[in-house]
Image (cartoon, rainbow, N blue to C red):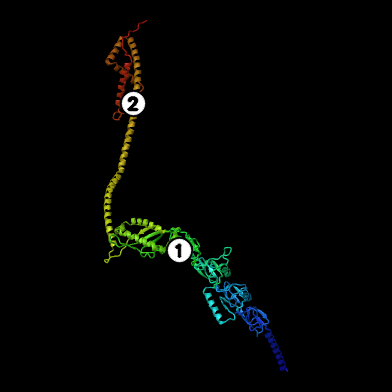
Amino acid sequence: MIADIWFSLGVTVASIVALAASVYLFLGVRYIPHRRVGIIEKLWSASGSLTDGRIIALNGEAGFQAKVLRGGLYVGYPFWKYTIHKVPLVTVAEGRIGYVYARDGQPLPPSETLGRIVDSNGFQDAVGFLETGGQRGRQRGILREGVYAINTAVFMVITETGVHTGPISSEENRMAQHWLEELQAQSGFTPVLVGNPRSNKVEPPDSATGLTGSDNIGVITVHDGPTLDAGEVIAPEVRDEKGGPGHNYFQDPETFLRLGGRRGKQLQVLTDGTYFINRWFATVELKPKTLIPIGYVGVVIGYFGGDGTDVSGSTFRYGEQVEIGRRGVWKQALTPGKYALNPYALKVELVPTVNFVLRWISGQTETHKYDEHLSSIPLITADGYEPLLPLSLVLHIDYQKAPRVIQRFGDVNRLISQTLDPILTAYFRDVAQSSHMLDLLTRREEIQRHATEELGRRFEGYDINCVAVLIGRPESARRKDGEDPIDSLFDQLRQRRLAEEQKETFGKQQEAAARLKELNQAQAEAARQTHLTETQIEIQVAANRGSAQFAEAEQLAKREIALAQGQARVAELIGQGEAARIRQIAEAEAGKIACIGEAEAEVSRQKVSAFGDNRLYALNLVAGELSHSTQPLVPEKLVMLGGDGQSSPQAGVFQAMMQLLTAWDALKEEAPVVEVKEIEPPKAA
């Protein structure tokens, strides 16, 4: 019983399963996961097969269908009519680029290498791509970061992670792998970074070039579009109606071609920034910027543009100078700085504008390397010496004439090797043939001056300024005996010079001896100068002392004279008084005599007669009176100077007495003489 139940249940389940399978198979129920897409392959169709070389069906023909099934459940795709290929979605990582190859579409014309961009929603609308004129082959359009539901039977997508090929042949798969390797080799899956804009580090400049790792530009080579005209090597820039790069710096290939862009190396370059460029359309080379250092100018030689009009003049027959942007040597040089110049379109020749030195010295080279092939100049002098002359030449090039120099010579190295070196060598060989070896050694300054003037005159015709010519010590090859002829000549010159120096030294020594004699005399005078000075001072002091004593004596003499005059006046006045008193006394005496009689008169006469001179008598009377006077005849203190400067009181008293006598004589002359007569006594009344 139970077995029958289980059997019936099994039959029922089997019937249900068979019914479901029949419904699934005949109704064509299909499920597509949401992380995949379904590529429909139609096994047969009443509409027939594909024609005209098409491999993708648009109208229900048998074959791979352009339409895809997105994630979900679908009905109507029976297994006996359709095969559904489930492929993963196409994923392009952030900051990466995906490339597309179309297996179907219109064929490419001979002038194009990539399929044009059509509106296909990022290659997700295969029907729209094929119906709007999409072309088979590699595409100009690229895929940016994102996830795409792409029919890989129509489009083969190459990303950094691999190739999305779908149900294709092994040959196509090998081709896709080859493209993958090429793109990886040229970093085609990453955008073009010019100037390293994503780096925040400050890079030091290179000591040799002066540029950092970020000082670069992107040189573009376009691989699609019309070819260049005959004779052109660089494709010109293309601009839109507003004068800007409408192709967004080669990121929009369709606009670039529509504006007339040509394939080949482009004149326009990429400067600092990030660019998503299809490497199948255009490849990018990173080149360093053009640096023109301080002290130089850059003369530009253009390899593109039309033929310009010569601006150098009809008399200048060394090529043509043209306007900026034309083919040829540009008339205007670039000043110091950094420039984003395309090295395939332009060549910049650096021309020094500061004074620079060229050394014709074997084994020596300046940092600019212009003189690395120059060596000392071999000469033959008039007296048979064969020296090697080392010299240096200081030059200057006017920055405004730099284009003419490059136009004439091509570069500075050719200027030196083809012009300066032959002229300089020939000039000094001519000088050596007319000079002796000793002249080269002793007249170097004069030779340098003449060489600077003469070479400066010659170089002016080549737009070069000769600043200075500097000659070094001539050298020569040693003889077999090891002796240098120039050293021998130097020995002779030194001996001659030594003799001259000795002559001059002897003269100087003689002059020094004379000077030494003068020095000794001066030193002796200096040594006795103190004594001489003291003696002169003593002489001056003695003279001053004598003058003082003389002045003092003169003052004392004047005082003595004044004192003597005063005393004399005193004596005179005293004498006059005494004389008056004597007269009175005499009159009184006379009266007395008259009174007492003749006897007394006689006595008086006898007294006067006894003196013999009335002056003596008067003096006797004065002396007697003075003896009773309270006024001292001689002052208590009296200083008198004699002839020898010493005082003599005796001489002073004597002098006073003599003065008194003199005064008496004067008084005698003035006063009347008193005669003593007898006076009669008065009679009694």
- For mark 1, give the secondary structure: strand
Looking at the picture, tell me which residue is in the foreground, 16 or 325.
Answer: 325
Indicate which disc, 1 or 2, sits on the residue closer to the N terminus: 1
* Res 637 seen here: no
Looking at the picture, tell me which residue is in the foreground, 281 or 552.
Answer: 281
In the depicted structure, whether residue 152 falls above or below residue 532? below
In the depicted structure, whether residue 426 falls above or below residue 559? below
- For mark 2, give the secondary structure: helix
The quadrant of the image that shows the C terminus is top left
Total residue callouts = 2
- Residue 667, given in percent of the width and then of the height, sits at 33, 17
- Residue 231, given in percent of the width and then of the height, sits at 49, 68
Q: Quadrant of residue 664?
A: top left
Foreground label between 1 and 2 = 1
Q: Which residue is mark 2?
A: 561
Q: Residue furthest right?
A: 1
In the depicted structure, whether residue 624 falls above or below residue 512? above
- Residue 603, given in percent of the width and then of the height, sits at 29, 12
Q: Amino acid at mark 1?
A: Glu
Looking at the picture, tell me which residue is in the foreground, 667 or 199.
Answer: 199
Looking at the picture, tell me which residue is in the foreground, 428 or 108.
Answer: 108
Q: Which residue is mark 1?
A: 349
Residue at the image point whose x is 33% and y is 55% from the top: 446
**How far is disc 1 from disc 2 in space, using C-alphas?**
119 Å
Q: Quadrant of residue 579?
A: top left
Is 516 on the left or on the right of 80, as rendered?
left
The quadrant of the image that shows the N terminus is bottom right
* Res 362 seen here: yes
Q: Amino acid at mark 2?
A: Ile
Q: Residue furthest bottom?
A: 1
